[in-house]
Image: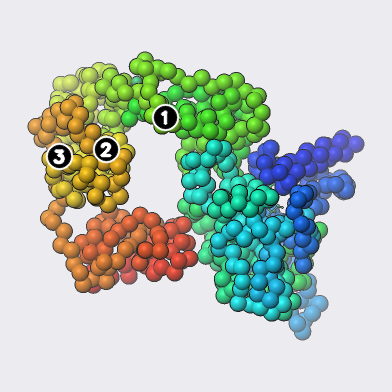
Amino acid sequence: MDSMHTMEQLVAELNKYNYHYYTMDTPLVSDKEYDVLYDQLVQVEADSGIILPESPTQRVGGELLKGFEPHRHLSPLWSLDKAQNIDQLRNWNNRVIKLVTDYNSKNPDNPLPDPCYAVELKFDGLTLNLTYQDGRLVQAATRGNGVIGEGILAQVKTIKSVPLTIPFSEGTIEVQGEGIMNLSVLSNYNLTAAEPLKNARNAAAGALRNLNPKATASRRLSAYFYNVGYSDANTFANHREMMDFLRENQFKVNPFITYFENFDDVTEELAMIVESRSGLDYLIDGAVIKVIDMETRGVLGYTDKFPRWAVAYKFEAEETTTVLESVSWEVGRTGKITPVARVEAVELAGVTVQNCTLNNIGDIERKNLKHALGARVFIRRSNDVIPEILGKVTEDNDGEEIEFPTHCPSCGFPLEQKGAHLFCYDSLNCKPQLIGRITHFASRDAMDIDTFSGMTAELLNTELDVSEPADLYSLTFEDLVKLDRFGEKKANNLLQALEKSKERDLASFLFALGIPNTGKATTRMLADHYRDLNAVMAATVEELVGLPDVGGIVAESIVSFFADPFMRAGIDRMLTLGVQAKAPEAPRVVSTDSFFSSKTVVLTGTLHKLTRDEAADKLAALGAKVTGSVSAKTDILIAGEKAGSKLAKAQKLGIQVIEDEDEFIRLLEM
Ligand SMILES: NC(=O)c1ccc[n+]([C@@H]2O[C@H](COP(=O)([O-])OP(=O)(O)OC[C@H]3O[C@@H](n4cnc5c(N)ncnc54)[C@H](O)[C@@H]3O)[C@@H](O)[C@H]2O)c1
Ligand SMILES: [Zn+2]
């Protein structure tokens, strides 16, 4: 009786979440939280042998939205069975093998081949089913309940990569794929949107199920296709043939698709995908493993909800919900004030999350978080960066107000707002700014002062009054040796490291200065172009904006940095104390007859025999233009190990890719 009660509660709760997720595209819980409850229900059903008629384990999708013309799919659309770990994946494979073996023993004259597998990305967007008649797109539908979907032809036509006509013109076919919003498109959209979108999946789904196709068009969606669900004139022997057909008919097919004869190789591929996940420009929530032989698929068949010949291998969730407890304000090295949120501790992607970033006050307002203290919020963690608060679960005014500071929480100086950010401009006296500047100056990509940390900067500041980088170079052994936890050895080590840093090159020195809005690539370019510190310091805005990748803001930042008498004095003092800021070595000989001459080259992934900087130097010396992102203008992509989205993009654009490092080196030396 108790399990009956649990079951009823779970069914009711899950159906409520389904409605908000599938029908409204505004989920109330994260997928992670949903999946936990769903798995509980599956377990209770298995234990009790009872399944309630309205159980979500028996149905695909959710209710249809009114206002769209219903479309009956020519063959049904399915959900996918799930494996949360490799053991569950092996169980799935064992079931496949058993069914194939059983079949073969009954049909010895016509046996099925040993299973081979395709591994694809599992896109997180909205399922699309496109109907083509005699080569023309005549309908596009959502999955709906798997049998009937919502007709969203006008909306789907706004996706530029969806072909309106295809070469294949024999009768009717239905092609399935996923409508998605690229993450870069989402973040661009959010830069100016009055109401930022929380999540790319809901953004895509909501846009496609918007009655106004103009609204859909403004989201600039994309779509990947992975299945021919129905064709009255064509059959395929296996998945490869089907993919070839899709490519030949100009559907966008994801380049990350691999085929394996051996199941162990599948698990290796999955590990690779997990690695490259954070480099992709779209959301995936797992990978899909499919048996490729079509006859085998027919024999394996379907349950009420999903095919037995495919399984989704779920990756660790990147989103969950928690409660926003408080907000504190941190001062960065440039004086920028960053709100840091404390949330109720929650597990996400393998770690316990307690702090999240809120970016800036502009973001708090745009994300409707101004009154969110104590409210439930969605958070997202990708890569290893600090998780971000995406927005409230419900848009109700149910929280306390987040008060914005008027004075620097560290030095008490009145704050100024510039754009979406608050700044403390008391940069010479505000302690976190001093410490931040010194720590940055010493960091690896800057002056590379060994063993120096934020704690060192803090200690030197409190005990020896080191308040700017130049002060570091007047430190003496006597000063250092009397410090807590220092001793002779450490004092000598630091002095040696400081001595060594005097030989750092101009690019690193410029980077170390921490000029606002000026990163490593720009300081390197400045060093290459001017080859002399005084020349950089004398550059004008007009001159700077003429240089590659320098815009007005960067140019202004550089000029006003060097115009500051305090900064100039600090630099002069460092030069007097022996800092060299060495110009790059001998002027570059630009060759014009090499393989790489006048080609635009992008480097990605890990190289083993060269660092990326070395490779870029060599390429530049051969007259190549080395850029950071792949576009139609790219001639060659050098893809080292674990190359991710850039490789996929290059393949998609048909750009020449060199994946073999030895071959790359051979071409460099040619
Ligand atoms: N947060 C919520 O409130 C909520 C509610 C309901 C469901 N969900 C989420 O949705 C999941 C269940 O979703 P479902 O049953 O709709 O779909 P599914 O996750 O079981 O997978 C089926 C879908 O995967 C998609 N897909 C992407 N790439 C594919 C590929 N390469 N090949 C084949 N299919 C591919 C297809 O669109 C297909 O419809 C749950 O696990 C849960 O995470 C969340
Ligand atoms: Zn301050």
Which residue appears at 50% of the width and 33% of the height?
Answer: 363
Going by the numbered disc 1, the residue's amino acid type is His
Residue 421 disc label: 1
Residue closest to the far right = 1
How far apart marks 1 and 2 lie (CA) works out to 18 Å
Q: Which residue is mark 3?
A: 538
How packed is label 2: few (under 14 Cα within 10 Å), some, or many (20 or more)? Answer: some
Q: Looking at the image, how many numbered discs can be counted on the residues?
A: 3
Q: Position of residue 240 (x, y in %)?
A: 60, 73
Which residue appears at 63% of the width and 53% of the height?
Answer: 213
Q: Which residue is mark 2?
A: 556
Task: State yes or no: discs 3 and 2 in contact (Cβ < 8 Å).
Answer: no
Can you tell which quarter of the image residue 627 is in? Answer: bottom left
- Residue 668 visible in rendering: no
Q: In terms of depth relative to the viewer, which is nearer, 487 or 638? A: 638
Q: Quadrant of ligand 2?
A: top left
Which residue appears at 16% of the width and 59% of the height?
Answer: 588
Q: Earlier in the sequence, mark 1 or mark 3?
A: 1
- Residue 522 visible in rendering: yes
How packed is label 3: few (under 14 Cα within 10 Å), some, or many (20 or more)? Answer: few
